Image (spheres, rainbow, N blue to C red):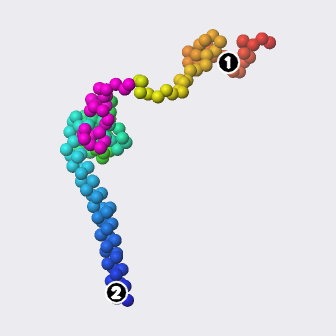
Amino acid sequence: MQGNTLTTGILVVAMVAVFYFLMIRPQRRRQQEQQKMQKQMQAGTRVMLSSGLYATVVSVGDKQAVVELAPGVQVTVLKQVIMQVVTPDSPYAEEGSTPAVGGATSAEPDPTDSEPTDFKPYRPKSDESGADERDLGPDDKPDSDGPDPNTKA
């Protein structure tokens, strides 16, 4: 009976140790690295947000940062959503050349590389006069409660 209790105690201690080394310790290390990255962040740094959006840091506060998603489009985000500083050698680096502020790249996409699509844009139906429903004002549309003036009685 004494050996069985000792074995159970050793197994419990071993499971706690394994849990600590496989779960808690790596998570703490990631948190420390993220905090270090957030403290070193400065204006002009290219980052990737946790949503997958790329942005350029404009200014950094204690809890928030102002980032520019596109030229003239600035948003304020919590520093915790800044997942990674993007460098040319990081795993989240954007393909091609390093983008300018706002994500515009110097390389233009080649239109011949795109595959043909069956996409047909929506076009509103026009009436007999050729005017779209968008072009008609509220007084130009036929009334639904009266008889149609175009039909003969």
From this viewpoint, which residue is outermost toward the front?
Answer: 112
**Residue at the (34%, 76%) spot, across then down:** 11
Nearer to us in this view, 127 or 2: 2
Residue 32 pos. (x, y %): 24, 53
Mark drawn on residue 3: 2
| Residue ID for mark 1 | 143
Tell me which label, 1 or 2, sits earlier in the chain. 2
Q: Secondary structure at mark 2?
A: helix
From this viewpoint, which residue is outermost toward the right?
Answer: 153
Q: Secondary structure at mark 1?
A: loop
Quadrant of residue 142 in the image?
top right
Q: Is residue 104 above or below residue 52?
A: above
**Residue at the (28%, 31%) spot, across then down:** 97
Task: Please report the bounds of the magenta region as a residue range.
Answer: 86-110
Residue 7 horizontal side relative to residue 44, left or right: right
Residue 149 horizontal side relative to residue 47, left or right: right
Q: Main secondary structure of the magenta part?
A: loop
